[in-house]
Image (spheres, helix red, strand yellow):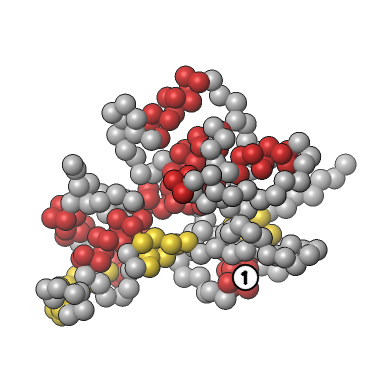
């Protein structure tokens, strides 16, 4: 028996708006009723090899079609190949994972454990999508769930919150060893703007002086000799990313000098 294999592509499109990290979402319409989903989802669609020779070309095409947004920097972050997820785990193992993921009992906070935190909430039934997915696995047709509380986040269609958590986790890790943060900054920026952008992605406050030492040490930016008078306070120098150096050496990212209590 032949089994059709469908390759689905989902896009986690991140931007910085008013100092916060935001993600582009859509509300897909039902193929039969044409009614929009009550839940948001990521732009997504099946890969059509007869129309696009690469995943990236297919991704760019359906994101533009669904959102009228032309993607900038794109890279493949992760591949999901599982048909489902197994929530079974003994209490001791689950507590050990929770301790590390949520920084309990003195464990250090790790901003990259986004996916692990979501998976633990899902396994505990605290992610609203969990009950819906269990009902669907039993052959039922439940309504889309509502948020259980603001602290647990808004539910999304399918497994899109899992994909979003994966994308954010990978982005938080990658800014430390590749200069991808500059894909989210304007061409000209102040060091304060750069720091706020990194903080918005990482979700942690940074030590101002130490962050500027990191930027200076990595030689990723250069001053333009002009001031930004629209900062709302004392004018600050404008900088630019030295993008041309990518052709001459392996550029690193920015380490995160945390602001400790």
For disc 1, the marked residue is 66
- Residue 160 lies left or right of residue 209; in this view the side is right
Residue at 25%, 51% (x, y): give it: 205
Q: Quadrant of the N terminus?
A: top right
Residue pushed farthest right? 1
Q: Quadrant of the C terminus?
A: top left
| Residue 116 drawn above or below residue 35 | above
- Residue 14 lies left or right of residue 1; in this view the side is left
Q: Is the residue marked by circle 1 packed among few (<14), some (14-19), or many (20+) residues within 10 Å?
A: some
The spot of residue 208 in percent (x, y) is 16, 56
Rendered image quadrant of residue 132: top right
Residue at 47%, 19% (x, y): give it: 92
Q: Nearer the viewer, residue 216 or 235?
A: 235
Q: Nearer the viewer, residue 148 or 36?
A: 148
Residue 70 in view in this figure: yes
The spot of residue 31 in percent (x, y) is 77, 63
Rendered image quadrant of residue 16: bottom left
The count of marks equals: 1
Q: Secondary structure at mark 1?
A: helix
- Residue 252 lies left or right of residue 232; in this view the side is right
Residue at 52%, 51% (x, y): give it: 154
Q: Nearer the viewer, residue 10 or 138?
A: 138
Rendered image quadrant of residue 248: bottom left
| Residue 88 drawn above or below residue 252 | above
Residue 179 in view in this figure: no
The spot of residue 3 in percent (x, y) is 81, 45
| Residue 229 drawn above or below residue 54 | below
Residue at 30%, 70% (x, y): give it: 244
| Residue 225 drawn above or below residue 151 | below
The spot of residue 96 in percent (x, y) is 42, 24
- Residue 56 lies left or right of residue 256; in this view the side is right
């Amino acid at each position: 028996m032949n089994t059709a294999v469908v390759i689905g592509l989902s896009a986690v499109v991140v931007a910085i708006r008013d100092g916060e990290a935001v993600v582009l979402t859509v509300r897909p319409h039902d193929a039969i009723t044409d009614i929009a989903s009550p839940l948001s989802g990521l732009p997504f669609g099946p890969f059509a090899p007869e129309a696009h020779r690469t995943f990236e070309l297919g991704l760019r095409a359906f994101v533009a079609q669904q959102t009228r947004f032309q993607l900038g920097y794109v890279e493949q972050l992760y591949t999901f190949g599982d048909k489902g997820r197994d929530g079974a785990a003994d209490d001791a193992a689950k507590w050990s994972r929770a301790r590390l993921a949520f920084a309990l009992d003195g464990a250090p906070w790790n901003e990259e454990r986004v996916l692990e935190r979501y998976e633990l909430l899902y396994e505990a039934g605290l992610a609203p999508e969990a009950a819906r997915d269990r009902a669907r696995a039993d052959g039922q047709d439940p309504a889309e769930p509502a948020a259980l509380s603001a602290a647990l986040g808004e539910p999304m269609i399918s497994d899109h919150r899992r994909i979003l958590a994966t994308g954010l986790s990978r982005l938080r890790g990658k800014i430390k060893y590749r200069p991808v943060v500059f894909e989210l900054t304007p061409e000209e920026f102040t060091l304060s703007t750069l720091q706020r952008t990194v903080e918005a992605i990482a979700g942690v406050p940074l030590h101002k002086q130490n962050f500027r030492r990191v930027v200076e040490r990595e030689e990723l930016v250069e001053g333009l000799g002009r001031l930004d008078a629209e900062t709302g306070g004392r004018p600050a120098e404008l900088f630019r990313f030295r993008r041309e150096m990518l052709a001459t050496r392996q550029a690193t990212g920015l380490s995160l000098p945390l602001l400790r209590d």
